């Protein structure tokens, strides 16, 4: 068909794009490319069309051809990088973005995309530089100012991030993510009243999955509760429920009748928590109520500051018979005078989990007997390394909700618990047990800025990474601290 046929298919593709007939456009551009495979524009248009259709793999292939034929074309570089980001291949996007910025430093989208790629590759320092360049090009962009703050936060510098989040909020005060991020930065700095207020914006995020709706029932706004029944429903993880269930006595003090809808695995354990009149698991029938609230909104509604965090610990209890049963079994595996240390290494979040091999230094501390508190996940590591490290895994622990009762009773029998940031660490804290808590580089906002302590659990001692991904260094310090505990117990 030659040149005439090429132009026919090319123009037909352009017309189909105008009509939003993308499958027809893609077919026409493919036909044109078959006739003139050396023509970079038709490959570019095919790639953009396929990308718009959500066919990222095919789009990447077409854009790679366009790039090879015209390596300095700005839009080809940008779309090629963008489709790699959509394919979750940020490492493949970097060369195109860096080339684009070198060719056209003023390209607004390139610096922003480069920052996003670098954040995905866990390089927040370089991401901050890219986002700052993007902010110079677009100073009134709410998203780019928010992302500068996010890159700084990922470096554990919440104070420096605050100004960027506040600027993003000023530019677009209606965007929930920016206000939520501001709240997280404030919470990490211990500015709890302001932080919990702005953290409320989390519920407006499109990705937020914990919202509940009860037609005809109002959300509690912090007003009078005397003579009213309030339903509090859980939000986020198991550890969050254990940590914030402490607020129910405050609701009772206001004269409320309280109902808590918890995660099913926690129902039996939380039955001992004070201030709960009716405890139901998700999926069970709810009693009638007058108003409702998410559990993690209670600190805001109760106007929490550091000095008013409820600290009536312990606020969970173990069954006396069960506690005695597990204590006897623990004592049967520990020599007289040994420090009984419960260990737990795997959390739901991968960044919070500690590879069990990092417990080697702790396993070599004289005068210590290690007991596994790990539930369900992570037991494969115990099979490989538990014997080598001398970790006692007592048989007979149950699964599901009853497993949490056994874990709580085991933790109660320990002199000390060493754990990652997980529900087990919260359970031990709520029981009033001393906990050495090993935290990743960017610890959760709840652990705030204190180097080694937390007002949420006075018996916790925090061990933070000195550099990213350094679980080895953290666990060496934990082992040294445990050795100090042994010497103190013997002195």
Image (tube, rainbow, N blue to C red):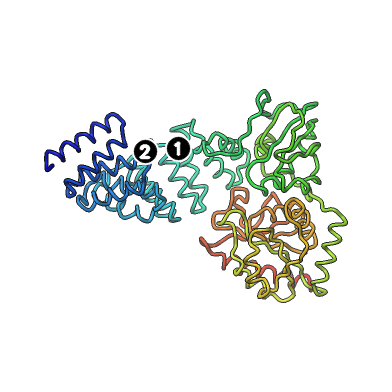
Left or right of 323? Residue 153 is left
From this viewpoint, which residue is outermost toward the right? 321
Query: Quick one: SS at disc 1?
Result: helix
Q: Position of residue 179 (x, y in %)?
A: 52, 37
Is residue 491 visible in the rendered image? The answer is no
Which of the 4 image quadrants contains residue 5?
top left
In the rendered image, which residue does mark 2 sit on? 139
Q: Compared to 173, does 400 lie above or below? A: below
Q: Compared to 155, does 176 lie above or below? A: above
Is residue 108 visible in the rendered image? The answer is yes
Q: Compared to 355, does 278 lie above or below? A: above
Neighbour tally class for label 1: few under 14, some 14-19, many 20 plus, Cα within 10 Å: many
Residue drawn 21% across the image and 50% down it: 72
- The C terminus - image quarter: bottom right
Q: Position of residue 382 (x, y in %)?
A: 65, 67
Left or right of 214? Residue 229 is right
Residue drawn 22% across the image and 53% down it: 68
Neighbour tally class for label 2: few under 14, some 14-19, many 20 plus, Cα within 10 Å: some
Q: What distance separates the C-alpha of mark 2 from that of mark 1?
A: 10 Å
Which of the 4 image quadrants contains residue 429?
bottom right
Residue drawn 46% across the image and 33% down it: 170
Where residue 434 is drawn, which disc sits there?
A: none
**Disc 2 or 1, which lies upstream in sequence?**
2
In the image, 82 versus 105, the foreground residue is 82
Q: Position of residue 379 (x, y in %)?
A: 65, 63
Residue drawn 49% across the image and 54% down it: 155
Query: Quick one: SS at disc 2?
Result: loop
Q: Position of residue 79 (x, y in %)?
A: 31, 45
In the rendered image, which residue does mark 1 sit on? 167
- The N terminus - image quarter: top left
């Amino acid at each position: 068909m030659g040149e005439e046929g090429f132009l026919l298919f090319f123009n037909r593709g352009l017309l189909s794009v105008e009509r939003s007939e993308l499958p027809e456009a893609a077919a026409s551009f493919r036909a044109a490319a078959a006739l003139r495979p050396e023509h970079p524009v038709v490959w570019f248009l095919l790639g953009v069309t396929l990308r718009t259709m959500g066919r990222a793999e095919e789009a990447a292939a077409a854009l790679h051809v366009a790039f090879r034929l015209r390596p300095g074309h700005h839009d080809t570089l940008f779309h090629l990088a963008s489709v790699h980001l959509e394919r979750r291949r940020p490492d493949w996007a970097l060369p195109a973005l860096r080339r684009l910025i070198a060719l056209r430093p003023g390209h607004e989208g390139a610096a922003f995309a480069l920052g996003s790629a670098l954040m995905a590759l866990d390089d927040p320092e370089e991401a901050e530089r890219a986002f700052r360049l993007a902010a110079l090009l677009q100073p009134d962009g709410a998203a780019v100012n928010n992302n500068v703050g996010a890159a700084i936060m990922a470096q554990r510098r919440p104070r420096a991030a605050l100004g960027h989040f506040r600027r993003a909020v000023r530019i677009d005060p209606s965007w929930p993510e920016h206000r939520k991020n501001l709240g997280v930065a404030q919470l990490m700095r211990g500015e709890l009243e302001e932080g919990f207020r702005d953290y409320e914006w989390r519920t407006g995020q499109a990705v937020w999955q914990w919202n509940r709706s009860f037609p005809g029932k109002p959300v509690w706004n912090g007003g009078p509760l005397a003579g009213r029944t309030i339903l509090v429903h859980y939000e986020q993880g198991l550890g969050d429920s254990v940590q914030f269930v402490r607020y129910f006595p405050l609701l009772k003090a206001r004269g409320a009748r309280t109902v808590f809808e918890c995660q099913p695995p926690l129902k039996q354990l939380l039955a001992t928590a004070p201030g709960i009149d009716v405890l139901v698991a998700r999926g069970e029938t709810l009693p009638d109520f007058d108003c409702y609230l998410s559990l993690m909104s209670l600190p805001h509604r109760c106007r929490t500051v550091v000095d008013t965090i409820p600290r009536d610990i312990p606020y969970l209890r173990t069954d006396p018979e069960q506690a005695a049963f597990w204590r006897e079994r623990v004592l049967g595996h520990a020599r007289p005078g040994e420090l009984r240390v419960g260990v737990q290494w795997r959390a739901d979040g991968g960044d919070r989990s500690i590879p069990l091999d990092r417990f080697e230094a702790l396993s070599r501390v004289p005068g210590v007997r290690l007991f596994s508190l790990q539930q369900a996940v992570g037991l494969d590591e115990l099979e490989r390394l538990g014997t080598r490290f001398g970790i006692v895994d007592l048989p007979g622990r149950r699964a599901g909700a009853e497993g949490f009762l056994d874990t709580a009773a085991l933790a109660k029998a320990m002199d000390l618990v060493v754990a990652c940031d997980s529900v087990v660490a919260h359970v031990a804290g709520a029981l009033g047990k001393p906990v050495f808590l090993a935290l990743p580089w960017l610890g959760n906002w709840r652990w705030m800025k204190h180097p080694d302590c937390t007002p949420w659990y006075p018996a916790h001692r925090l061990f933070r990474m000195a550099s990213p991904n350094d679980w080895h260094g953290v666990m060496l310090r934990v082992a040294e601290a445990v050795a100090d505990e042994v010497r103190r117990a013997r002195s």
